[in-house]
Image (tube, rainbow, N blue to C red):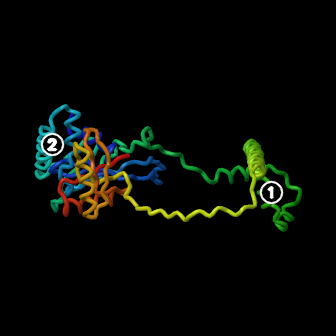
Amino acid sequence: MGIENHIQQLLYRYNCVVVPDFGAFLTQMKSASIIKSTNTFYPPSKRISFNEQLSSNDGLLVSYMANAENKSYEDMLKYTLDVAKTWKKQLHSGERLKISSIGELWLNREGKLQFQPSNEINYLTSSFGLSSFVSPVVTREALKEQVEELEEKIPFIITPEQRRKSSFRPYLKYAAILLLALATGMTGYRFYGEMLNKKQVVLEEAQSLVSKNIQEATFFNSKPLELPELKLNVTKKSTGNHHIIAGAFRIRQNADKKVIYLRKKGYDARYLGVNSYGLHQVTYGSYENPEEALIFLRQVKRTESEDAWMLSTK
């Protein structure tokens, strides 16, 4: 299985997949949209982008490939570095690099790297099974034409001259609209009336139950018990699905020591848990917003450790 397939599998689960010594493929939520010119509706999805500055190995892709291919981590790291070298050589030779179901990369005239994402696959798992569709145009004049047709069938009881003076025609329009609504919506009105009756019955039963509970309660004329005021000190903790990993340890005590050390340095560090490899993970901090997490990751790499990386969980 090629490296492209492994990147695709990781894009379903993570918002950042780094190809060592090449760059990172990032995903960001995109809301459902509509193209008015074609009346085409698109479901929510993940929008893919590329950042060549995030090229430090975070271990995610290499570890995943080593586990999937049943090979050593060192062999997979050498393989990914060779692929990255081949891709760079292809780009600098003026060719376009097409990565299946991910996108296309090329260098413009100024030598800057450009990326065009592919729309073949929707990597948002919550939109699985949803596809784009074209909706027929809604004709707003259809009801008006039906009303005018009914209006012409209603006999006038006055002469045309009197009709112009008294402006009786607008009232006939309203009557035609009412007849059309009654003819097509009687079932809806009956259903609405039944729902109102059911709602009234439920409200009456709830009020009866509350009154019964109040009547059964017994209150005594005694001095209320004075309880001491309770004060709680709440410390706000960083939460979120995007964690900046400080390290992974085989022994839990070493992970706890790392948390204490980072907290003394001012980080909102905490113990994250055990990963699939049985290692105890420690995070510098966690964020809800992936962009804020990436900004913090760059800061940590610049000031604290180049080995820091981001883990995104569901």
Q: Residues within 10 Å of mark 1 (few under 14, many from 20)?
A: some
| Among the 4 quarters of the image, the one containing residue 60 | top left
Instruction: Look at the numbered disc 1 and give the secondary structure of its residue.
Output: helix
- Residue at 29 percent across and 39 percent down: it is 9
Furthest residue toward right:
157
Going from N to C along the chain, the mark reached first, 2 or 1, is 2
Residue 6 as seen in the image, left or right of residue 200: left
Q: Residues within 10 Å of mark 2 (few under 14, many from 20)?
A: some
- Residue at 27 percent across and 57 percent down: it is 260
Residue mark closest to the camera, 2 vs 1: 2
Taking depth in this image into account, of 257 and 244 the one nearest to the observer is 257
| Among the 4 quarters of the image, the one containing residue 100 | top left
Label count reads 2
Coordinates of residue 294 in the picture (x, y in percent) = 28, 58
Taking depth in this image into account, of 218 and 304 the one nearest to the observer is 218
- Look at the picture and state if 160 lies above or below 102: below
Q: Amino acid at mark 1?
A: Leu
Residue linked to disc 2: 80
Residue linked to disc 1: 172
- Residue at 20 percent across and 46 percent down: it is 59
Q: Amino acid at mark 2?
A: Thr
- Residue at 18 percent across and 58 percent down: it is 305
Residue 187 as seen in the image, left or right of residue 1: right
Coordinates of residue 110 in the picture (x, y in percent) = 16, 62
Distance CA(mark 2)–CA(mark 1): 77 Å
Is residue 189 visible in the rendered image? The answer is no
